[in-house]
């Protein structure tokens, strides 16, 4: 199985992918350790660029299917909800885009750092904080319920990440 995570961060900072890797390592160790399961990341640099990476996504899918024609490929967009009217409009556009393309959608309310640390950080701190999270035992302090919130009841410092990953890992 190929899973492509499309994340907001850029390919230098890679903060979002560090959090997701830690979740996979902690809650889905057997899935992540299976050599038949491949994880790739596509970096948006900004969630407003959500519709600019289709070519890169399709490249990964074609390359994977050329070697594994019968195995599934799943694309998961991981997006911060942020706040305000403009964010809500953009989130609705992203939701429609994911639905139209049959992509999974994970929201972090209001952002990924709030979900994993319980607070916001300045942009310049995000890379260091994600690395600290990856190397520390911080993951053990996360309440599973905060990562298993359905989209209709998503509120601050919560996400639907584990709901999406649970449904995908059961398919493998």
Image: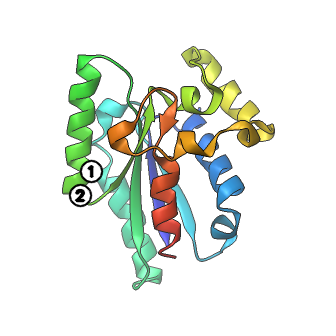
Identity of the residue drawn at 48% across and 28% down: 111
Q: Position of residue 117 (x, y in %)?
A: 64, 27
Total labels drawn: 2
99 displayed left or right of 75: left
Q: Position of residue 92 (x, y in %)?
A: 22, 36
The answer to which of 148 and 8 lies nearer the viewer is 148
Disc 2 residue crowd, few under 14, some 14–19, many 20+, Cα 10 Å = few
4 displayed left or right of 14: left
Identity of the residue drawn at 58% across and 37% down: 14
Q: Which mark is residue 98?
A: 1
Q: Element type at marker 1? A: helix
**Marks 1 and 2 close (CB-CB < 8 Å):** yes
Task: Choose top left, top right, bottom left or bottom right for residue 33.
Answer: bottom right
48 displayed left or right of 20: left
Q: Position of residue 55 (x, y in %)?
A: 30, 55
Q: Is residue 113 visible?
A: yes
58 displayed left or right of 126: left
Q: Which residue is mark 2?
A: 101
């Amino acid at each position: 199985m190929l899973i492509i995570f499309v994340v907001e961060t850029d390919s230098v900072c890679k903060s979002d992918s560090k959090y997701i890797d830690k979740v996979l390592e902690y809650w889905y160790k057997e899935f992540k350790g299976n050599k038949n399961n491949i994880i790739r990341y596509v970096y948006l640099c900004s969630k407003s660029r959500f519709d600019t990476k289709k070519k890169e996504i399709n490249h990964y899918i074609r390359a994977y299917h050329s070697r594994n024609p019968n195995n599934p490929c799943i694309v998961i967009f991981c997006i911060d909800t942020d706040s305000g009217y403009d964010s809500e409009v953009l989130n609705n556009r992203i939701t429609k885009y994911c639905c139209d393309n049959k992509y999974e959608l994970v929201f972090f309310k209001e952002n990924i750092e709030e979900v994993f640390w319980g607070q916001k950080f300045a942009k310049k701190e995000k890379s260091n904080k994600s690395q600290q999270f990856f190397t520390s035992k911080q993951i053990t302090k996360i309440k599973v319920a905060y990562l298993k919130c359905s989209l209709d009841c998503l509120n601050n410092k919560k996400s639907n990440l584990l709901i999406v990953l649970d449904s995908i890992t059961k398919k493998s």
